[in-house]
């Protein structure tokens, strides 16, 4: 595809432009007088719209109290568009209208969903949309049952729809002032939300591969799918164990066994990009908050509704370090070599994430003085599109009391986390083809 020098935008630039367009549209809709109860400032409308489109869940306005039904529906629509990607949604509308999907649109879908080939991309989109809406409908039914014990059937239905879409898209927006803390001991609500989060965060390529594997057991799962499934399961288990061990004599000391198990498991699942909470994060121990920061940076998997550096990036970096320590030339995972270009890309993504998060934490902390760990937690939550926050003892995130400058920094961080640091920097910086290869130098490291 032609680049800027020839007057055309690159796929990365078009992807960023599309997300910005949806964010601006959402901002305009939220600024309408019948979207909010008592009005909303421009910066708060931008923040809320970005948080919804980037499926983050950080809030500076109380969703159930400050927004009208129309405002809540706007937020819900932004979550669905942001979670699936605007290209997927536009493709769906084009298919409904009977319009043919062109080559350029296929290239954009490939870029937005982070898939490796354009072959069968329209068929893949159809299967993806079918799975998404099936999962959201099933989630709605189960949550409708779970919420109906405390709410009327019509209210429980709307709550079910909203939380099912929010959970599957890993958004973390809730219509309860305390997120899901009131349902801490509810097995049905907890497991429904967790299964929706995992389904949305595991990646559509993996889900499609699993379907094909179930249909034909002789076929092997792709290396990508094996990595994602294995690492996701390990992170959930280890995350639950570490959180439990850290909080067993603190947060969990006053809870029963069922609440403790559900809370530990839920905290591990939601930390990887969802943002719902069944415990008060302002009361957690510093070591638990720091460990949660690590989970938030790792995030979900490629081609999913989640953010972070992604499970595969984390795995490639860890295995590359292990291979280097053992003196091996190649990075091997599940008896298959990882191409050097992908290893280099993973290292760059990891480095960009660490540098960016560290720099932004220092800047925001210098502006707001909210405590270094609390500030880092907020920044990483935005970067990982998670939505968890230590808050201020209320339902709002820590960002609610930030200055306009800091809120804009968090807005940019959410956008970077949703699109990926490499994609965003490639969109901002002009790409130049390298025509000269310099001689190899000699230097000492280590």
Image (cartoon, rainbow, N blue to C red):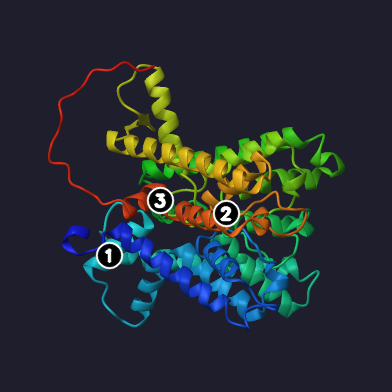
Residue 406 numbered mark, or none: 2
Would residue 110 be visible to someone looking at this image? no
Is the C-beta separation of discs 2 and 1 under 8 Å? Answer: no
| Residue in view at x 53 percent, y 42 percent | 297
In the depicted view, which residue is nearer to us: 85 or 99? Answer: 85
Question: For residue 86, what is the image quadrant?
Answer: bottom left
Q: What residue does disc 3 label? A: 213
The Cα–Cα distance between marks 3 and 2, rounded to whole angstroms, is 47 Å
Which of label 3 and label 1 is nearer to you? 1
Res. 99 image quadrant = bottom left
Circle on res. 294: none
Q: Which mark is residue 106?
A: 1
Where is residue 176? Give x, y as percent. 73, 65
Q: In this orientation, does residue 329 appear?
A: yes
Q: Secondary structure at mark 2?
A: helix
Q: Quadrant of the N terminus?
A: bottom left
* Rendered position, 380 above or below 30: above
Per the model, the C-alpha gap separating discs 3 and 1 is 25 Å
Q: Earlier in the sequence, mark 3 or mark 2?
A: 3
């Amino acid at each position: 595809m032609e680049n800027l020098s020839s007057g055309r935008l690159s796929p990365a630039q078009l992807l960023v432009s599309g997300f910005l367009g949806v964010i601006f549209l959402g901002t305009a809709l939220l600024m309408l007088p019948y979207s909010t109860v008592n009005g909303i400032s421009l910066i708060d409308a931008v923040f809320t719209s970005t948080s919804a489109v980037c499926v983050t869940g950080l809030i500076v306005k109380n969703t159930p109290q400050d927004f009208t039904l129309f405002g809540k529906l706007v937020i819900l629509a932004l979550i669905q568009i942001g979670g699936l990607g605007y290209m997927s949604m536009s493709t769906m509308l084009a298919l409904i209208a009977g319009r043919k999907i062109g080559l350029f649109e296929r290239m954009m879908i490939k870029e937005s969903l982070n898939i490796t080939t354009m072959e069968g991309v329209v068929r893949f989109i159809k299967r993806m949309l079918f799975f998404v809406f099936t999962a959201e409908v099933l989630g709605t039914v189960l949550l409708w049952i779970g919420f109906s014990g405390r709410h009327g059937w019509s209210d429980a239905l709307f709550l079910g729809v909203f939380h099912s879409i929010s959970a599957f898209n890993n958004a973390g927006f809730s219509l309860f002032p305390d997120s899901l803390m009131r349902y801490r001991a509810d097995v049905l609500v907890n497991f429904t939300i967790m299964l929706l989060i995992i389904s949305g965060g595991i990646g559509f390529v993996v889900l499609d591969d699993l379907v094909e594997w179930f249909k034909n057991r002789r076929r092997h799962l792709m290396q990508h799918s094996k990595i994602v499934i294995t690492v996701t399961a390990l992170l959930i288990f280890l995350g639950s164990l570490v959180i439990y061990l850290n909080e067993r004599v603190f947060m969990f000391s006053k809870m029963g066994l069922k609440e403790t198990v559900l809370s530990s498991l839920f905290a591990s699942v939601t930390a990887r990009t969802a943002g719902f909470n069944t415990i008060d994060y302002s009361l957690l121990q510093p070591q638990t908050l720091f460990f949660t920061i690590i989970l938030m940076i790792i995030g979900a998997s490629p081609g999913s509704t989640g953010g972070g550096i992604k499970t595969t990036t984390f795995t490639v970096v860890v295995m590359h370090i292990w291979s280097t320590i053992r003196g091996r030339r190649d990075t091997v995972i599940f008896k298959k070599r990882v191409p050097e270009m992908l290893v280099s890309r993973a290292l760059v993504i990891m480095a960009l994430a660490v540098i960016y998060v560290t720099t932004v934490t220092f800047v925001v902390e210098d502006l707001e003085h909210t405590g270094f760990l609390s500030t880092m937690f907020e920044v990483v939550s935005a970067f990982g599109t998670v939505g968890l926050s230590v808050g201020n003892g209320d339902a709002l995130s820590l960002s609610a009391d930030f200055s306009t400058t800091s809120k804009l920094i968090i807005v940019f961080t959410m956008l970077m986390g949703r699109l990926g640091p490499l994609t965003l920097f490639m969109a901002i910086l002009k790409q130049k083809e390298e025509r000269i290869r310099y001689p190899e130098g000699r230097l000492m490291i280590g």
